[in-house]
Image (cartoon, rainbow, N blue to C red):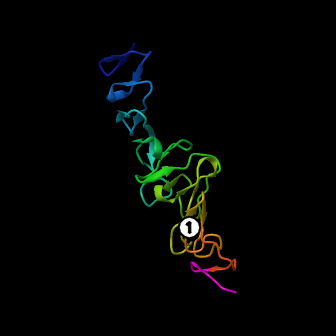
Amino acid sequence: EEECKQKCCDRSTSRCCGKAGCCPKNRSCCNNGGDEQVCCPAGQKCAIPILAGDIGIKPGSKSICCPAERYHANPKLCCPPGQVALNQPGQQVGPGLSPFCCPRGQICGTGASRTCCQRGDVLGTQTCCNGRCVDTQFDPDNCGRCGNVCASRTCSRGVCAFT
């Protein structure tokens, strides 16, 4: 056993998590800075949060318990709510997007080919068609919508051009 803030933790099943008391070994003990510790709920990991609208972290940010979908393992970061962590090798993001997170609605593909599609006025808006990000405004194989193939092979502003 291990002494933990006037309690005893069974070392075979738990460990001391400071002021939070005994924390089961299969759960994360999160130190939020100073004396503040919390035993994270099952399935969550301790990580530094990326704030909504940012692509990185703020200096001095305190760690939080992070749900598995939002947890980025290396480095240990927590994506904002509504975003998922890009942990798998081969995942790509474009300019202005976090290299760690992607908004859920912009995820495209699966496994190692999973990418984060661009959305915005400056860089254009991409749509996920058959597992890859395409610009339906100019893609002759997906002109205006996924699967709309231009016979002329020219797509301009989402309309097939006739030649």
- Count of marks, rendered view: 1
Front-lying residue, 37 or 127: 127
Please name the residue shown 51% across and 59% down the image: 106
Residue stretch in magenta: 156-163
- Work out whether 128 lies above or below 57: below
Q: Residue 111, image x and y in percent?
A: 60, 47
Viewer-closest of 48 and 114: 114
Foreground: 161 or 83? 161
Q: Provide the secondary structure element on which disc 1 rests.
A: loop
Residue farthest to the left?
A: 6
Residue 158, above or below 35:
below
Q: Is residue 85 left or right of residue 154?
A: left
In the current view of this chain or complex, which residue is farthest to the front? 151
The percent coordinates of residue 105 (x first, y second) are: 47, 58
Answer above or below: position of 26 versus 58: above
Q: Position of residue 128 (x, y in %)?
A: 56, 62
Question: Is 132 left or right of 62, judged from the image as shown?
Answer: right
Queried whether the magenta region covers residue 160, the answer comes back as yes
The image quadrant of residue 73 is top right
**To which residue does mark 1 refer?**
126
Which quarter of the rendering shows the C terminus? bottom right
Counting from the top left corner in percent of width and height, residue 114 is at: 59, 52
Q: Main secondary structure of the magenta part?
A: loop
Amino acid type, mark 1: Gln
Is 16 colored magenta in this rendering? no
Q: Nearer the viewer, residue 12 or 144?
A: 144
Q: Residue furthest top?
A: 1
Mark 1: few, some, or many residues within 10 Å (few <14, many ≥20)?
A: some
Quarter location, residue 53: bottom left
